Amino acid sequence: MSAKSIEIAGWADSDGNAPPVVCALRLVRKMRGGAQASMVETSGGFYVVKWKQNPQHRRVIINEFVAARLLRRLGIASPEFALVRAERRFLDDNPEVAISGRKGPVPVGVGLHFGSRVPVNPDKKAIFDFIPLALLSRVTNLADFLKVFVFDLWVDNNDGRQAIFFRAGSKDLSALMIDNGFAFGFDGTEWRMRDKTICKDRHLLSELYVSEQSARIFEATIPRIAATTAADLEAIRQSIPREWVEDDDEQLSHVFAELNRRSQRLPILLRQALEGLAERAQSAREVTPDKRCGPQPGIPRQGNFIQTRERISAVGLQRVRTRLAEEWSDGEIAAAGHQPRPFSRAG
Ligand SMILES: Nc1ncnc2c1ncn2[C@@H]1O[C@H](COP(=O)(O)OP(=O)(O)O)[C@@H](O)[C@H]1O
Ligand SMILES: [Mg+2]
């Protein structure tokens, strides 16, 4: 099958690029994780594909698609994405893509699915779900974790933040934000966006949120998101492939109206989340006294973020550090090859 990249009407991103439709050619491997995604070679390169028939819900691929468009629009590091067409021949030639269901295999259907582009040639370069904390300083775009923290509050990501890491130089690593299947307050069945003081797993990166530049990046991200207009959101809603929406029009209208409303409430959402982090740090400190948890010297008391930052200081991450150190030593990363590991949980 020849490479093809079809433009969809009205589907130009803010960077002017229309997302492609690519054709699935060959299953490379099945990925870990609850959605039973597959890495697939397509007419446009390698993609990790979530199928419409995934065991979580059809709505998960709507969430992936909308979140991917928003993230890229906001310039938050995330994979390129495409609509991946599975044709009958691909499905017949690659029967292993079928979903394992409780009552046996569920076939993947002919049609469009969500593809998250693999950022490097997976045969040549390693991609990691997980890096030891010791290597965090080698990630060149740590600021994206701060930006996506605000994004996750906006979209009420109901899952822990997940990222992939790959080498961007001899020593440097790049991170891309992935797995937005439970964005928009998705609880596995319904979209229920709510305010939460703190979302799952965020404490793993607590040290980052209290870094010197965090307040500046948080403050810069809020107006960027708030500048997303109702019309911008509507254009994204209209671009969701019709065959994924089925009879969800009304629910999706609510989701998008709520997104619009929440974009104006981000300062409050962020303050609540930071306070939640601080409280959690405080209780961790009370349970495990640790000298490193004391206030960092030299941080002036000014403004909410700084105060909160001071209160959190170097959170009691000893438990996490120990766990990560057990899993991977610094030297092992080079030798590990492509062995996706969960960032903080299975998949
Ligand atoms: N764009 C991508 N490039 C490379 N690997 C990816 C990409 N997207 C996902 N993966 C890998 O596929 C796995 C499953 O994808 P994920 O979105 O986390 O699905 P699930 O909802 O099943 O957890 C991830 O843990 C990661 O290893
Ligand atoms: Mg995952």
Image (cartoon, grey):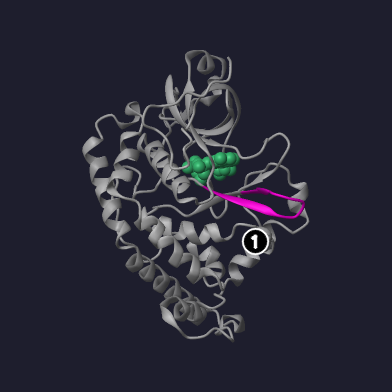
Does 328 sit left or right of 35 as displayed?
Answer: right
Displayed quadrant of residue 43: top right
Image quarter in which the N terminus is found: top right
Q: How many marks?
A: 1
Is 150 contained in the magenta span?
no
Magenta span: predominant SS is strand
| Label 1 lies in ligand 1 vicinity (Cβ under 8 Å) | no
Question: What range of the chain is rendered magenta?
Answer: 165-177
In this rendered view, identify the residue nearer to me: 303 or 23.
303
Give the percent coordinates (x, y) of residue 318.
Answer: 61, 72
* Residue under the point 50% across and 81% down: 310
From what the image shows, is residue 294 above or below residue 83? Answer: below
* Ligand 1 occupies quarter: top right
User: Badge 1, how many Cα within 10 Å: few under 14, some, many 20+?
Assistant: some
Give the percent coordinates (x, y) of residue 214.
Answer: 51, 69
Element assignment for label 1: helix
Query: Hey, what amino acid is under mark 1?
Result: Leu
* Residue under the point 54% across and 75% down: 315
| Residue to which mark 1 is pinned | 136
* Residue under the point 24% across and 49% down: 257
From what the image shows, is residue 26 above or below residue 61? Answer: above
